[in-house]
Amino acid sequence: MRFILGSGSPRRKELLAQLGILPDAITPPDIDEDPKKGELPRPYCARLAREKAAAVQAGPEDVVLCADTTVALGRRILGKPRDAGEAAAFLTMLGGRRHEVITAVAVRRGDRVWTRQSVSAVKMKRLSDVELNAYLASGEWQGKAGGYAIQGAAGAFIPWISGSFTGIVGLPLAETAALLQAAGYPVWSVK
């Protein structure tokens, strides 16, 4: 049994390492991540995790883990910003408001797929022009849902969360460990 991480995210690899899990292979799938017309954040996030897991090539006994993290402001999906202007718009929208960070996890072994979602509430403070411009200049917003990473400098902008910190980072460890165990992967075995 091989363990395949279907993600190029260094954060997901680091979070798995906290459980003592090192992937045998890392194969990020190439799928269309655009939301469907009228698609709501939670179903969108779950669909992407399932589609990613289905797209990874694996043997019948291999365990594949994929995830998707989405930032939602009400019914609006804030994906990965295309440029600094969109990142600034996202961060300005989020400022002073609560939003949801949804991470869906899909684990596949053969034809079976197990899924779970972690939904956390996050409040971001209103950013001053100095804070916003410094954060944009750092480039840390690139490739991050909603334009920020709580585990980086943007952590200084987050006075309150309710939910899973690891889920906000990109892989909720409690849910992930439960899914891997359900798929027969020995999470807690002595290695």
Image: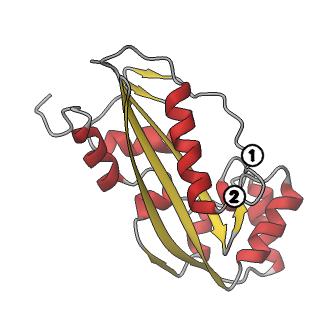
- Residue 154, position as x, y percentages in the image: 62, 66
Looking at the image, residue 80 sits to the left or right of residue 8; the answer is right
Q: Residue at x 51, y 29 (%)?
A: 54
Nearest the eye: 159 or 182: 182
Mark 2 or 1: the one toward you: 2
* Residue 51 placement: quadrant: top right
Nearest the eye: 189 or 20: 189
Type of amino acid under label 2:
Glu
Q: Quadrant of the C terminus?
A: top left
* Residue 28 placement: quadrant: top right
Type of amino acid under label 1:
Asp
Q: Residue at x 74, y 55 (%)?
A: 138
Which label was assigned to residue 34? 1
Q: Residue at x 23, y 40 (%)?
A: 182
Name above or below for residue 5 compared with residue 166: above
Nearest the eye: 21 or 127: 21
Label 2 secondary element: loop
Name above or below for residue 55 compared with residue 171: above
Looking at the image, residue 145 sits to the left or right of residue 22; the answer is right
Looking at the image, residue 105 sits to the left or right of residue 31; the answer is left
Label 1 secondary element: loop
User: Which residue is tagged 2?
Assistant: 39
Q: Quadrant of the N terminus?
A: top left
Q: Is residue 32 visible?
A: yes
Q: Is residue 7 visible?
A: no
